[in-house]
Amino acid sequence: MVARFISTMGSWMQTVAAGYLVFQISGNAMYVGLLAAVALAPSLVGASVGGRLADRYCPRKLSIGFALFEVLPPLALALFAFADALTLPVIFACVLALSIPHSMSQPIFALVLPFSVPEELRHDAVADASAVYNTGQLTGAVLGGMAVQDVGAGLAFSINAASYFIVAMVLIASPILQRACDLARAHHDVSIRTGLRKGWGLLVVKMTIFGAATFFFLVAPIEQLMPKIAAEHGEGAMLLGLLVGALTVGAIVANPFVRRWAGDVRGAERTLVAGVLVCAPAVFLLGLSSSLATDIPLLVVIGFTWEMVFVSGGSSLQLDVPPDIKGRMVGIFYTLVTGAAALGAVLMGVLFEDIGVTDSLLLIGVLSGVGALALLLRWRSGRSLMDGVE
């Protein structure tokens, strides 16, 4: 968990630094959206590949290898920053070089984490991992803004490079995680098509796919486009870190509630649907907001719903589906989450430039509400059928 905190903190220091620099260099929100797409788009393929690898090979050894490779791109960014040679092509190239291995390592690392605790505590371990991630995100967002403003982006990139090395060292020193490797060796048919066919018959898989697609395509890109929102209400990297941090505060506050609400399959489904429902009016009101006094509490609410959707969906696929398809289901989940967010970030960036931040957020709030109602009806129908069969 300590390694996850350090890694997340470093990643978010880089995210804030890179997003701020791209907006400062280009002055265009569309480029920030493109940066998000470059960071997230490889997961359209990489996450599924990583999930398949996790069902066939040792997840612990794979995680170590990926972590060591992921040291290099942020180290290159740091060197360019210290040499005052950062340009848009350099930033985009280094972010892409990191996002490709990171997209494959995400589902693998997600499967390794629960094996760090006894079996009866694994649901709690997933929630704890999310809490650690959120705390690292908050710390990284704030420190990233401070680093860029007071020292320089090179510090943020250097810390991120060091964080991946620390993760690799922790995994090397943790033989308890070998159990994840033993389970992987027991699986033979690891095709993605077979895994999806087996999983699609489960209501929790369908609801996770529909709910995550709605939330991460429409709502999650707000985080990536935060430099534009910050520019509307003020200036400076510190303000950007504060707004990103507000999302994370909401997720941290939500974690103990989500842990209790999503303790079983039915509760996880209910929590996911509720998260998508609640986020829609919060996004709409964010469009009407014109000051930090209202921006921050609304972003806290959106962060709360983010935790509801991500943890309830992710934990169910990690723990409540048949063991032989877990890796592929988690891989598909990360593919969907990051792919939808990447596409949504590009479209949101275009909207922000064409019709403005206010009208864009109002439109997104309405579309999110429509998607949430459709999800609710689909869940009630599917749950009624299952209850009838039981």
Image: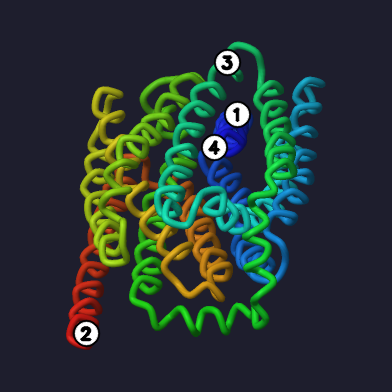
N-terminal of the pair, mark 4 or mark 1, is 1
N-terminal of the pair, mark 1 or mark 3, is 1
Query: In front of the other: label 4 or label 1?
Result: 1
| Element under disc 3 | helix
Q: Which residue is mark 4?
A: 28
- Across the whole image, how many numbered discs are drawn on residues? 4
Q: Amino acid at mark 4?
A: Asn
* Circle 4 residues within 10 Å: few <14, some 14–19, many ≥20: some
- 156 horizontally vs 355: left or right: right
Q: Residue at x 73, y 56 (%)?
A: 62
Query: In front of the other: label 3 or label 4?
Result: 3
Disc marking residue 149? 3
N-terminal of the pair, mark 4 or mark 2, is 4
Q: Which residue is mark 2?
A: 390
Disc marking residue 356? none
Q: Amino acid at mark 3?
A: Gln
* Circle 3 residues within 10 Å: few <14, some 14–19, many ≥20: some
Q: Amino acid at mark 2?
A: Glu
Q: Is residue 45 visible?
A: yes
Q: Residue at x 46, y 78 (%)?
A: 199
Q: Is residue 40 above or below residue 95?
A: below
